[in-house]
Amino acid sequence: MLAWRLLLTVFTAVLVAELADKTQLAVLAFSLRAGAARAIAGAIPAFAVVQAASVALGCYMGYRLPERAVRAAAGALFIAAGLLSLRREARRKRGAGAVAEVFTSVLLAELGDKTQLSSIAFAAATRAPLAVFAGSLAALSAVAAATAAVGGKLCERVPERPLMLASSALFIAAGMLTALGVL
């Protein structure tokens, strides 16, 4: 039986932790580049994979991955994505390539993230993997959907070039803040 109180507790904790997080910035940037539907189509499966691994592995991942190395790698990936985006700013990704890029970026951004670590802690403390998985995935999906919708609306109202430049700037800023441990 699903523990509804725990599910709601996990949902609330993860939702609050995800607000203004680097992954939310990534979903916004991808929605500006590839559209809201593609951003969501790539982000939610990535969240599912990361949360399933977090719940299944429990505390193991939290103790095996050095936080500083994960933060530096994630920061470098975001900066690289921003710089690559500047290089090809006029070419907006479409189709499966955009979804795969979102999936990979969100998956890597979530590794060692506070939402992943909170899911590991909830799973280890409660031994209720289904409730933890459902609550965390629902929260991450809700934030991603709302963020991508905002990005999609911006795409309808603002010319593409400023959005592409803003997307690149978001990636670079998220990368620098991640590497510094601010995000």
Image: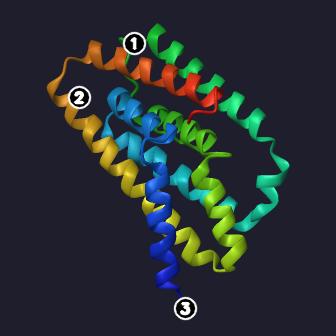
Q: Position of residue 166 (x, y in %)?
A: 35, 19
Report, in whole angstroms, how far the alpha carbon at label 3 lies from the one at label 2.
43 Å
Mark seen at residue 20: none
Measured Cα–Cα span from mark 1 to mark 2: 14 Å
Q: Earlier in the sequence, mark 1 or mark 2?
A: 1
Q: Earlier in the sequence, mark 1 or mark 3?
A: 3
- Residue at the image point whose x is 53% and y is 42% from the top: 103
Q: Which mark is residue 1?
A: 3
Q: Which residue is drawn at the image coordinates 41% and 32% (left, top)?
A: 30
Q: Is residue 129 left or right of residue 170?
A: right
Residue density around tag 2, few if under 14, some if 14–19, many if 20 or more, within 10 Å: many
Residue depicted at x 28% and y 12%: 161
Counting other residues with Cα less than 10 Å from the Cα at mark 3, is it few (<14), some (14-19), or many (20 or more)? few
Residue type indicated by callout 3: Met
- The local crowd at label 1, few if under 14, some if 14 to 19, many if 20 or more residues have their Cα within 10 Å, is many
Across and down, in percent, residue 143 comes to 38, 52
Residue 89 tag number = 1
Mark 1, secondary structure of its residue: loop
User: To which residue does mark 2 refer?
Assistant: 155
Helix, strand or loop at disc 3?
A: loop
Quadrant assignment, res 121:
bottom right
Q: CA distance from mark 1 to mark 3?
A: 49 Å
- Which tag, 3 or 2, sits closer to the chain's start? 3
